[in-house]
Image (tube, helix red, strand yellow):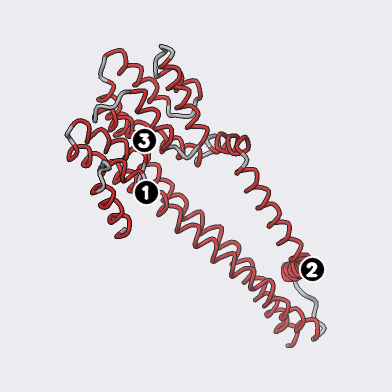
């Protein structure tokens, strides 16, 4: 950060504008750079900086909430899988060798785990190679522009996850466009900036199509509704805002409504996922432990 600020300061002393000096650094968002240019041109740099900081704060808060809601279940599930793999691959084979050495017949569930352990040990390397090959193929498809377009499009149709992505995209679109319009940027230029903010290339393409439609004299709501990717309320309220000349106020209300929806959905998911993870993890680990102790009890019972 110190290096970046020093470089910006030096470029300004050399005669560059603040926006141009910031644009030479890759760490600044497109919307921030656009707002800086507007602020310098209109003499309202302090106002647009405040709007930029508020926009970034909202985005960071939403991302943090989503990551926090998903991090706990992922960590617990990963730990459960690690414990299960360790017992199946390391502990149970030793127990099986001990029981077979005593001439005891293993309980069915313990024998199943031992067979599973033997299969994993025999084909584990091939499984890792296959998983690695699938990962490489998936990355290659995602890096291929048509492949990424289709993946981003299908991601919006995935149950629950797709709904979250659509909510987040709606909030990002309405909030960014609202901030840009309030700062004096035209709708066309605002859409150009918003298009570059979306990491989902399918959504970015819809925003680009909306910008081109406006240049041809069409409305903003129609091309946004055609893709079916944004929440339905956005397109309907944008149509109302265009008809009444209150697009900025409408976008503000749309942002507030969908932010509340997104937070409520995240809280609901956190409430549902935690007990579901507990049941799944408890079932996996419990099955392994039961198989372990059933085998021990069978030995103890056979020795009496």
Picture mark count: 3
| Residue occupying image coordinates x 60% and y 37% | 145
**Among the two numbered marks 3 and 2 on one chain, the one whose residue lies closer to the N terminus:** 2
| Residue occupying image coordinates x 40% and y 19% | 221
**Among the two numbered marks 2 and 1 on one chain, the one whose residue lies closer to the N terminus:** 1
What is the CA distance from the residue labelled 2 to the residue labelled 1?
52 Å
What is the CA distance from the residue labelled 1 to the residue labelled 3?
26 Å
Q: Which residue is mark 1?
A: 25
Q: Which residue is mark 2?
A: 122
Q: Of 30 and 18, which appears nearest the observer?
A: 18
What's the mark number on residue 171? Answer: 3
Frontmost of labels 2 and 1 is: 1
The quarter of the picture where residue 101 lies is bottom right
What's the mark number on residue 168? Answer: none
**Among the two numbered marks 1 and 3 on one chain, the one whose residue lies closer to the N terminus:** 1
How far from the left and from the top, in percent, is residue 118?
Answer: 77, 70
Q: Of 116 and 217, which appears nearest the observer?
A: 217
Does residue 297 lie above or below 261 as drawn?
below
Quarter of the image that includes the C terminus: bottom right
The quarter of the picture where residue 46 lies is top left
Rate crowding at label 1 as few (under 14), some (14 to 19) or many (20 or more) other CA atoms within 10 Å: few
């Amino acid at each position: 950060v110190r290096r970046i600020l020093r470089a910006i300061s030096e470029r300004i002393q050399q005669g560059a504008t603040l926006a141009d000096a910031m644009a030479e650094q890759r760490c600044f968002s497109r919307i921030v750079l656009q707002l800086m240019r507007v602020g310098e041109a209109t003499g309202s740099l302090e106002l647009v900086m405040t709007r930029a900081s508020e926009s970034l704060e909202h985005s960071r808060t939403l991302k943090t909430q989503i990551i926090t809601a998903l991090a706990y279940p992922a960590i617990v599930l990963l730990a459960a899988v690690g414990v299960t793999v360790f017992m199946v691959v390391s502990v149970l084979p030793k127990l099986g060798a001990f029981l077979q050495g005593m001439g005891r017949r293993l309980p069915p569930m313990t024998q199943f785990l031992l067979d599973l352990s033997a299969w994993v040990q025999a084909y584990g390397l091939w499984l890792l190679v296959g998983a690695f090959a699938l990962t490489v193929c998936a990355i290659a498809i995602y890096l291929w522009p048509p492949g990424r377009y289709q993946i981003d499009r299908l991601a919006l149709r995935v149950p629950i996850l797709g709904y979250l992505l659509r909510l987040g995209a709606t909030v990002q679109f309405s909030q960014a466009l609202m901030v840009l319009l309030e700062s004096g940027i035209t709708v066309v230029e605002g859409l150009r900036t918003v298009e570059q903010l979306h990491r989902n290339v399918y959504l970015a393409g819809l925003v680009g199509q909306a910008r081109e439609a406006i240049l041809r004299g069409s409305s903003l709501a129609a091309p946004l509704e055609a893709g079916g990717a944004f929440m339905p309320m956005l397109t309907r309220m944008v149509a109302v805002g265009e008809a009444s000349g209150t697009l900025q106020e409408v976008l503000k209300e749309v942002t507030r409504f969908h932010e509340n929806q997104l937070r409520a959905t995240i809280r609901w998911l956190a409430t549902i996922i935690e007990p579901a993870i507990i049941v799944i993890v408890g079932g996996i680990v419990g099955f392994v432990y039961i198989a372990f102790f059933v085998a021990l009890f069978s030995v103890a019972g056979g020795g009496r």
